[in-house]
Each structure stands twice: as C-alpha cells, then as structure tokens.
Amino acid sequence: MRAQVAKQPLDANIHGLVERLKQTRYRAKLVRRPYSPTGDGTQRPLGMPAVEDKRRQLAVARLLEALYEQDGRRCSAGYRPAVGALDAVDTLTIKLQCGRYAWVGEADSKQCFDPAC
C-alpha cells in the first residue's frame, strides 16, 4: 500500500515533465552550488541539478545511447556502457605486446583549453 501511495506522485511528476518537454515549455532550474572543503583547506564547488533535470538528462542519455551504440565499434572504450578505462588499458597492453607498433605517443590536452594560449 505504501509503495503505491509513493508511486502516484512520481508517475504524475514524470507525466507532467514529459508533457512540458513535448510542448517545449520545460525550462531547466538553476543548479545548486554548495561548496565542499578539500584537504588543503580550499573549497571545491559542487553542481547539484534538480531531480527533474537529472531525469531529463538520463532520458536523453538513454535515447542517444540507443541510437548511437549500435554504430559503435567494438574496439572503442570511451564513454560506452559496460566498458571502462581498465578495458581500454587491457586492450592497449595486448595490442602493444602483440602488434606491430613502433612508437607510442603521449599528450596532455589540458593546456589546449587554456584561454591564455
């Protein structure tokens, strides 16, 4: 009984969100910006979107995943479901040991996004 009472407002909220999205009346809410202390005494900003915005983001992510995952290559490990960085490292290790590679390049892209450059 209790689960059904809790489910009714959730279903109504989701239905309302879907209707607002269909009618292009949905506007994202401002992200809450609390600060978390770090080990060195500084404060690190956190971004906490509203629950409704997180639901919308999840729905869009699931839709895009359904569309594009079928075109993904098996060897690709970046930002794919059930494939992580360790899988990419394992694949790279095998390719480097068994493949015909003469060199490996390493780059740091952090400064590429520096506005001073």
Image (cartoon, grey):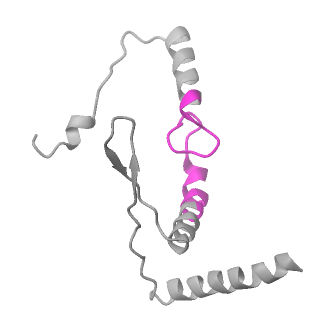
- In the rendered structure, does residue 95 fall within the stretch colored magenta? no
**Residue found 43% across the figure and 12% down from its top:** 101
Question: 15 or 8, which lies in front?
Answer: 8
Q: Is residue 38 left or right of residue 87?
A: left
Numbered-mark total:
0
The image quadrant where one finds the N terminus is bottom right
Of residue 67 and residue 28, the one placed in the foreground of this image is 28
Point 45% across, 86% down: residue: 24
Residue under the image location 53 percent in, 32 percent down: 85
Residue 112 against residue 67 in the figure, above or below: above
Residue 99 percent location from the top left of the image = 51, 12
Q: In the picture shown, does residue 36 fall above or below 53? A: above
Q: x, y percentage for residue 34?
A: 40, 60
The residue positioned farthest toward the front in the image shown: 41
Q: Is residue 55 left or right of residue 2?
A: left
**Left or right: 8 in relation to 59:** right
Where, quadrant-wise, is the C terminus in this rendering? top left
Instruction: Locate residue 88, reporting x and y percent.
Output: 54, 28
Q: Is residue 64 magenta?
A: yes
Q: Residue at x 46, y 62 (%)?
A: 48
Front residue of 109 and 37: 37
What x and y, as percent, mark residue 63?
58, 65
Q: Which residues are magenta?
A: 62-86
Farthest-out residue, left = 116
Q: Quadrant of residue 83?
A: top right
Outermost residue, right side: 1
